[in-house]
Image (cartoon, rainbow, N blue to C red):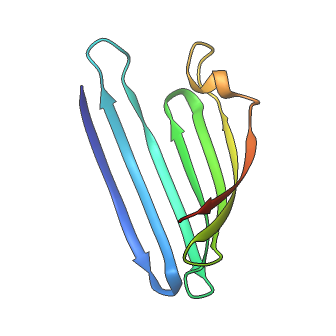
Amino acid sequence: MAQVIAGCDRNLDGGIYLNGQLFYDRYSSYRDDYGLTFALSQKYFNDSLNVGINALYGRENEHSVEVFAEYAVSDSLSMNIRGYWIGGGPAYGMYRSYDRNDYAELGFKYYL
């Protein structure tokens, strides 16, 4: 397997994080994969709240989007909410098996 990734990763003013990447994966016994990824998030309230979006677009219209919010209530407790949309690709592809199986997640973490 060989992999090539080219991208940009920046922390901007105002707590904004930006990341974009192009990728190409070469497999010896499977078809090649390629596409792009994108991430954008911003922190609020003294970095207690992080809100953002992550996305992927790949070969044959494979795609996914994640929207999230993570809030640190205290040093030992955090909560998050996420929404995922996944789909596209050929009928035999991995992403097609997730098509129309989008979901939302609510999570809590407590550190002892």
Please tell me which residue lies in front, 60 or 28: 28
At a point 67% along the width and 61% down the height, the residue shown is 80
Q: Is residue 4 left or right of residue 41?
A: left
At a point 39% along the width and 52% down the height, the residue shown is 21
Name of the residue lying farthest toward the front? 112
Residue 95 in which image quadrant: top right
Looking at the figure, which quarter contains the N terminus? Answer: top left
**Where does residue 46 sit, x and y in percent of width and height?**
57, 88
**Where does residue 98 sit, x and y in percent of width and height?**
67, 27
Q: Is residue 12 left or right of residue 86?
A: left
Residue 53 in which image quadrant: bottom right
At a point 59% along the width and 18% down the height, the residue shown is 90
Please tell me which residue lies in front, 82 or 4: 82
At a point 47% along the width and 49% down the height, the residue shown is 37
Please tell me which residue lies in front, 33 or 11: 11
**Where does residue 49 sit, x and y in percent of width and height?**
62, 76
Q: How many marks?
A: 0
Name of the residue lying farthest toward the left? 2
**Where does residue 92 sit, x and y in percent of width and height?**
58, 12
Q: Is residue 36 left or right of residue 76?
A: left
